[in-house]
Image (tube, grey):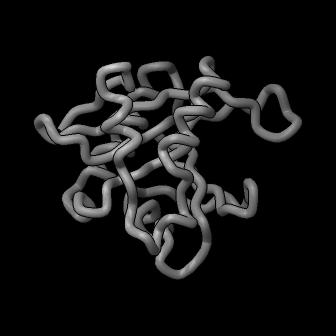
Amino acid sequence: MRLEKVTPGNYKAALGLSVRPDQEDLVAPVVKSLAEAYVFPDNAWPRLIFDGDRPVGFLMAFLGVTWGHNPDDLRSGLWRLNIAADAQGYGYGRFAVKAVCEEIRARGGNRAYVTWEPRAGGPEEFYLKLGFRPTGEQSGGQAVGVLDL
């Protein structure tokens, strides 16, 4: 497994990734993430997840973003995680979260944040198993979790 920058040579592979139909309300499509990465280039870290030559997912981290109205509360974490429907359950999501945490750590961060839709069938259990703990905060109606690095 490896990460690659999204480039003119592979962006179509990124756009072709889709989650299961029952997950479509849980995560924005890759095209929206790439648009946001273009608009917020100083904070977005988009990457394709490959297994060999096969693209199996997409992630986007947010790096050094001000939380709320406190300019001293800078946060980094996982903004988006899209694992292709036929690639789920093989450890790609776990790999992606670990890679984001390593990037945050390499930039001097000591915490990783993530948000999730708090509903049955959502990713809460996945993030909790990875060590994230709920902060009690919400962002856009989603639960916020934190992992000490």
Identified at 51% across, 21% down, the residue is 108
Residue 111 shows in this picture = no
**Dividing the image into 4 quarters, which one contains the C terminus?**
top left
* Quadrant in the rendering for residue 68: top right
* Quadrant in the rendering for residue 36: top right
Q: How many marks?
A: 0
Along the viewing direction, whichever of 128 and 41 lies nearer the viewer: 41
Identified at 57% across, 66% down, the residue is 25
In percent of width and height, residue 23 lies at: 47, 68
Along the viewing direction, whichever of 108 and 61 lies nearer the viewer: 61
- Using residue 52 as the reference point, say whether residue 80 is left or right of it: right
- Using residue 107 as the reference point, say whether residue 39 is left or right of it: right
Q: Residue furthest bottom?
A: 120
In percent of width and height, residue 75 lies at: 65, 34
Q: Residue furthest left?
A: 52
User: As displayed, is residue 91 above or below residue 38?
Assistant: below
Identified at 26% across, 50% down, the residue is 92
